Image (tube, rainbow, N blue to C red):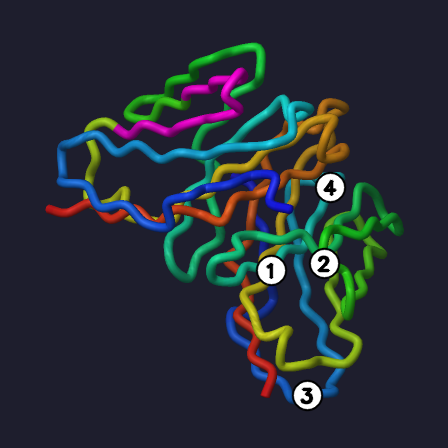
Amino acid sequence: DQQVKQNSPSLSVQEGRISILNCDYTNSMFDYFLWYKKYPAEGPTFLISISSIKDKNEDGRFTVFLNKSAKHLSLHIVPSQPGDSAVYFCAASGRGSGTYKYIFGTGTRLKVLA
Amino acid sequence: DVKVTQSSRYLVKRTGEKVFLECVQDMDHENMFWYRQDPGLGLRLIYFSYDVKMKEKGDIPEGYSVSREKKERFSLILESASTNQTSMYLCASSRRDIGGWQPQHFGDGTRLSIL
């Protein structure tokens, strides 16, 4: 039972355009969400987070949007750069997953074309 | 910066061997985690620990055990390695927060092959 889903395994975007990565969750008890970026042969690195009391959080070129009624979050990267090419994981935590634990999605591989 | 160090980047072992994967963090974090990453399955939690000598099962603990004798070190043990344990193993740590909202910091992973 996949509680956090990333339905697009891959995405290709032209350099300079917007990248939109999507994530859906099923557990309404989740109240904190994160995005991680992972390059090959490296561990995931924390990118941006959002708590359920907000619907948007911005950090430079990265913005995360949360739609609680739809149980959906998205990561927008504007403008996309070739160095953004990586696998992106969303993760969720809260009373539903147990203290300290995150449930990760399966990842979306983003390729930014120069 | 938080540093999480995994002892090996690549490891090749034989079926039936007992395998130890070591992880050390230098930020005095209370929580430590072991995941495995497989294509199409994302990151799956094997075990985690929220204090020295404390451990809890994650989603896929079968065939694994862990040890946390010191705060900075968390070991994953494959009691009798099998080919279906060939995977990328990732260790992570995080600061304790009552809300559980601290980001986890990951090591670079150990790619383990069981022949």
Disc 3: which residue: B15
Q: Does the magenta stretch include residue A12?
A: no
Badge 2 and badge 3 in a common chain: yes
Q: Earlier in the sequence, mark 2 or mark 3?
A: 3
Q: Residue at 74% of width from left, 87% of height from top?
A: B16
Residue at 46% in and 43% down: A89
Comparing marks 3 and 4, which lies closer to the viewer?
Answer: 3
Q: Do callouts 1 and 2 mark residues in contact (Cβ within 8 Å)?
A: yes
Chain bearing tag 2 is: B
**Circle 1 sits on which residue?**
B36
Sooner in the amino-acid sequence: mark 3 or mark 4: 3
Question: Which class describes the residues within 10 Å of circle 3: few (<14), some (14-19), or many (20+)?
Answer: some
Disc 3 marks a residue whose amino acid type is: Thr
* Residue depicted at x 56% and y 43%: A104
Residues rendered magenta in the picture? A65-77
Asked if the residues shown at circle 3 and circle 4 are in contact, with their CB atoms under 8 angstroms apart, the answer is no
Q: Which residue is drawn at 57% across and 83% down?
A: B12
Q: Are marks 4 and 2 on the same chain?
A: yes
Disc 3 to disc 4, C-alpha distance: 31 Å
Residue A71 in magenta?
Answer: yes
Q: Which chain carries label 4?
A: B
The residue at the far left in this view is A114
- Give, as a three-letter code, the residue at label 1: Arg
Badge 1 and badge 4 in a common chain: yes
Decide whether the magenta segment is chiefly helix, strand or loop.
strand
Q: Are marks 1 and 2 on the same chain?
A: yes
Which residue matches tag 2? Answer: B60
Q: Name the residue under label 4.
A: B31
| Secondary structure found at label 4 | strand
